[in-house]
Amino acid sequence: MAIKSATATIDLSALVYNFNAIKQMAPKSKILAVLKANAYGHGLERIAKALPQADAFGVARIDEALALRAGGVVKPLVLLEGFFTGDDLAVLAVNNLQTIVHNEQQLQAIEKAKLDRPLKVWLKIDTGMHRLGIYPEQFNAFYQRLKQCPNVQNDIVIMSHLGCADDRTSATTEQQLAVFEALSSTLAEEKSMANSAGILAWPNSHYHWIRPGLMLYGISPLLPNDASVSPVKPVMTLQASLIAIKAIRANETVGYGGNWQSTSDTTLGIIAIGYGDGYPRHAPNGTPVLLNGRRVPLVGRVSMDMITVDLGPAPKDQVGDVATLWGKELTVAEIATYATTIPYELLCNISRRVQTQYALP
């Protein structure tokens, strides 16, 4: 009997397939592959090294970029939140890190810095999402100051971020694109707008650079009710073993708080995964788990280290059998819907105690 603790298997062939599928959608665009949050839970350095075709990688913060540099990754790296203090600028210059500029404080810090080499800058405009980015009326002044600053390379990238691109029916994306066009159309600089949803649903957002994140890892970035067939394959399969099987009688309860009660005699299976591994604690009764080719329902509350499923009255399952929590036949998007969250959160919440193994292309 071989018991398998919580294990995430990363299919690097699927990752490369997804990258190529994305490239086909925007063949004239360069690809900044987004690797923030430990490559959405898939392993920062391993994912970077599996994508030598990428033109650049995007991370959120400087520690992620430095980890990639320490791991031998030499591709251009872009800090998608920019830098936080002026003291970071020397580190950016030494490590050849590119930065987004999205506020006055960052611009002033670059202007005042004493650097051995100029920085590559991406200037971010808030075209309507109202998160990071300068206001449209600030654009001309920021652009001119960056162009005149000796600490900034001459080839600035103009960018923005789409807030509602996952919804094909929303007018917001076209409004954002109109603002972006009005500000940047006469400039010779490279431009970037499209996230995963923009790549898939809004071809006019592709420009010179696209920034795929969720799609790289095999999940559709569109709303769950969108009928589009996903062109990508899931990269992560999360599995764990059945560690106990026990019979219960009708009307008996299961788990903390006894929030599930059997309606008939049945058999329970206990699986070695829980919220301590990143499985969603609020997954409700009925959330599917794939076991021996069939779906069995979650019953009772998710514990830190275990979940319980209803195997039915006469199961053939055995201790040691491997259950799939999400993967190719049971998508993380479906589990996210049951747990009233989004796939991003489930992937990013995979904990350090989950074993990660890589299936090579």
Image (cartoon, grey):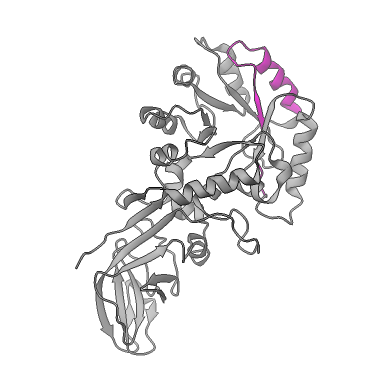
The answer, for residue 91, to whether it is visible in the render is: yes
- Image point 29% across, 71% down: which residue? 270
Residue 114 coordinates in the image, percent (x, y): 51, 9
Which quadrant is the N terminus positioned in?
A: bottom left
Q: Which of 25 and 64 is in front in this view?
A: 25
Residue 72's place in the image compared with 86, above or below, is: below
**Where does residue 205 sit, x and y in percent of width and height?**
71, 41
Residue placed farthest to the left in the image? 1
Q: Can residue 160 be seen in this view?
A: no
| Figure quadrant of residue 288 | bottom left
Classify 268 as above or below 73: below
Q: Position of residue 164 (x, y in %)?
A: 67, 50
Furthest-front residue in this view: 361
Q: In this view, does 279 lie above or below 81?
A: below
Q: Nearer the viewer, residue 281 or 50?
A: 50
Give the image quarter of residue 162: top right
Quadrant housing residue 224: bottom right
The residue depicted at 31 percent of the width and 58 percent of the height is: 6
Q: Which residue is drawn at 39% across and 43% down?
A: 43
Vertical order, 309 against 76 (above or below) = below
Magenta span has 162? Answer: yes
Position of 317 with respect to 289 (left or right) is left
Label tally: 0
Residue depicted at x 44% and y 30%: 65
Left or right: 129 in relation to 37: right
Q: Which of 13 and 89 is in front in this view?
A: 13
Q: Is residue 185 magenta?
A: no
**Image: magenta residue range:** 137-164
- Residue 308, x across and y down, in percent: 33, 72
Instruction: Using the image as rendered, state which of residue 250 and residue 333 is in the foreground.
Output: 333
